[in-house]
Amino acid sequence: METANIIQATGVRKTYDTGKLKVDALRGIDLSIQRGEMVAVMGPSGCGKTTLLNVLSGLDDLTGGQVVIDNAPIHTMSDRKRTRLTIRARPRMLTATSGGASTATDTRPSRARLA
């Protein structure tokens, strides 16, 4: 059964391990975004905004949980398919700034430059 959600994240966890220190950047995030819905990611500096956007777009790997984009789990995608997804999806996602506010950006090249 097809879902109306374009992005479905369940139990998303991301831990950075330096060898001496483990930092839990994301701890069990659940998120659903429907097609056409606008979402802002806001919070103080260092709370995980950029990390969340990176794992949702397939740019970073998850430590745990699952992200499904347009009914396709990103952890099952090949590197090539994830790269295409990132190129297509990331510029349309909201980008977080270090000041805690989020701004919408669209940095895709124009069609003229793609041809």
Image (tube, rainbow, N blue to C red):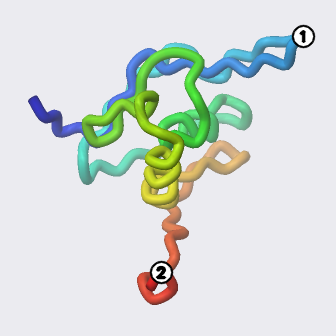
Residue under the point 63% across and 40% down: 50
Residue at screen point 28% across, 42% down: 70
Front one among 62 and 27: 62
Residue 84 in picture, x, y percent from top left: 46, 54
Q: Residues within 10 Å of mark 2 (few under 14, many from 20)?
A: few
Q: Classify the position of the C terminus by image quarter.
A: bottom left
Where residue 47 sits: x, y (%)?
66, 29
Note whether 86 is above or below 1 in the view shown: below
SS at circle 1: loop
- Mark 2 and mark 1: span between their CA atoms? 45 Å
Q: Position of residue 99 (x, y in %)?
A: 71, 47
| Helix, strand or loop status at disc 2 | helix
Query: Does residue 93 show up?
Result: no
Q: How many marks?
A: 2
Disc marking residue 20: 1
In the image, which disc is placed on residue 85? none
Q: Select label 2 or label 1 by which is in front.
A: 2
- Residue 72, by quadrant, is top left
User: Is any atom of residue 68 visible in this view?
Assistant: yes
Residue 76 x/y as whole percent? 41, 29
Q: Nearer the viewer, residue 49 or 58?
A: 58
Kind of residue indicated by mark 1: Lys
Residue at the extreme bottom of the image, as rendered? 112
Q: Residue at x 44, y 59 (%)?
A: 88
Q: What amino acid is at disc 2?
A: Leu
Local crowd size for mark 1, using a 10 Å CA cut-off: few (<14), some (14–19), many (≥20): few
Q: Are marks 2 and 1 in contact (CB under 8 Å)?
A: no
N-terminal of the pair, mark 2 or mark 1, is 1
Say which residue label 2 marks. Answer: 114
From the viewer's perspective, is 108 left or right of 111? right
Classify residue 103 as left or right of residue 4. right
The structure residue drawn at horizontal position 85% and vertical position 12%, both measured from the top left corner, is 21
